[in-house]
Image: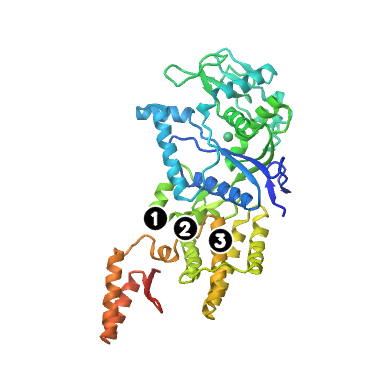
Amino acid sequence: MTVHIYNSQTKQKEVFKPIQAPHVGMYVCGITVYDYCHIGHARVMVCFDMIVRHLRSRGYDVKYVRNITDIDDKIIQRAIENGESTQTLTERFIKAMHEDEAALNVLRPDVEPKATEYITQITDMVQTLVDKGFAYAAANGDVYFRVEKFADYGKLSGKRIEELQSGARVDVNEQKESPLDFVLWKASKPDEPHWSSPWGEGRPGWHIECSAMSKHTIGEHLDIHGGGHDLQFPHHENEIAQSECAHGHTYVNTWMHVGFVNVNNEKMSKSLGNFFTIRDVLKSYPAEVIRFFLLSSHYRNPLNYTTENLDNARAALRRLYGALDGVKLVTPAANLVSQWTDAYNAVMDDDFNTPQAFAVLFDLATEVNKAKATKDQYLAGQLAQLLVSLGNQLGILTSEPSAFLQGGIATDGLSEADIQAKIEARLAAKKAKDFTQADSIRNELKSAGIEILDTPQGTTWRRI
Ligand SMILES: [Zn+2]
């Protein structure tokens, strides 16, 4: 068994070799909690959830840490606008984030460190960088990192110090020695939340929080560090600079970045108004459809958010549930297990290729349907059980097939009771040999998007 992972730093797929197998330390940059999570956040959450689930299924003992940024400029600004404390604001949105994640069947990380709970570890690391000459305190109480002192700066993003220097605009910040330097500790303005430090009252910069929290939750050397694509520069580049200068050795073996979510092929942004929160989308689509959609593109590729793509995700899931519908699950024979599990693992071990993993599930669904067509209930039951098990590894196919097929957002205004009443009326009409009436009820339901199925177990229905 060999897992290959694309490393954003070396820009190639590499054989994954944990520092101390089977243990794996994985740190992912989490959310800055001042608003509801959007669909771009959802993609990062769901993709790393999928990655952790797969590594665990392959026998790795993964410690998954994802931080919560609960202090920064945007949080302070929003708390002032709302007339509440930063703590009240962040606690509310942490709770909302957990609700959204639970809806999307995202397993909670093992540790969710909050920046405000690691102030001592953060100031200790800043002090180490000052002591080693990699950082300096400015006259106003800010502390900055001396970018030009770190020869490897740019090794993740491929940006070179000389290019950054020539590209840097004239910096009006007279506190910095060089425009490239970035803040490690910010002196606080009056009325802002603040903590004591050797440089006066202030709060941590964003980059240093991840260097300090990853060290204190996992260690100085991480197997995997991940985040959204936009974090490569400067956030992750600056984390490398801080951690490697503080510790004197490699910080991360494998860097992983999840691609953007676009909306109708445009970048999703608040200013374009094409911005969707997880809560918005949950009003129109079942959570499982959203999860399927988020995994339907390879995690490194951009993902295009359109109603058409979400509808396609719903249709795809309906095909899988349609195969499972009415089949009694049976424990599969060993040869079937190895045949299908090997096919699934082969594509997932290859840099977590979820589109290919879905293709394996569809092949399996086709085989279930063939077995159903030939009335081989035993084979259908075994294959259906495999389909459920492999789907569950991706966090899908967790519903009862009939519940999923009957669910969805009703556009016809028919409640379940209405539908049931019409089915009863149709059966009564059939019994009375009034086939015109029975057909008319069937057609009426069909035009309302409801399909009637007469099975040996009785009449059931599903949304078309
Ligand atoms: Zn981070």
128 relative to 366, above or below? above
Residue behind mark 1? 284
Q: Nearer the viewer, mark 3 or mark 1?
A: 3
Which quadrant holds residue 367? Answer: bottom right
Disc 2 residue crowd, few under 14, some 14–19, many 20+, Cα 10 Å: many
448 relative to 456, above or below? above
In the rendered image, the quadrant that contains the N terminus is bottom right
* Mark 3 or 1, nearer chain start: 1
**How far apart are labels 2 and 3 at the CA level?**
24 Å
Residue 389 tag number:
3
Asked whether, in this view, residue 122 is left or right of residue 434, the answer is right
Q: Camera-side residue: 257 or 372?
A: 372
Q: Residue at x 66, y 64 (%)?
A: 338
Q: How is the image coloured?
A: rainbow
Q: Which amino acid does the dot numbered 1 rest on?
A: Ser
Q: Which amino acid does the dot numbered 2 rest on?
A: Leu
* Mark 1 or 2, nearer chain start: 1
Asked whether, in this view, residue 115 is left or right of residue 349, the answer is left
Q: Residue at x 53, y 49 (%)?
A: 46
Which quadrant holds residue 89? Answer: top left
Pointers 3 and 1 in contact (C-beta within 8 Å): no
53 relative to 145, above or below? below
Pointers 2 and 3 in contact (C-beta within 8 Å): no
**How far apart are labels 1 and 2 at the CA level?**
10 Å
Q: Could you tell me which secondary element the residue under label 2 belongs to? A: helix
Residue 275 at least partly seen: no
Q: Nearer the viewer, mark 2 or mark 3?
A: 3
Residue 77 at least partly seen: yes
Q: Residue at x 54, y 23 (%)?
A: 119
Disc 3 residue crowd, few under 14, some 14–19, many 20+, Cα 10 Å: some
x and y, in percent, of residue 242 in the image: 65, 27
Pointers 1 and 2 in contact (C-beta within 8 Å): yes
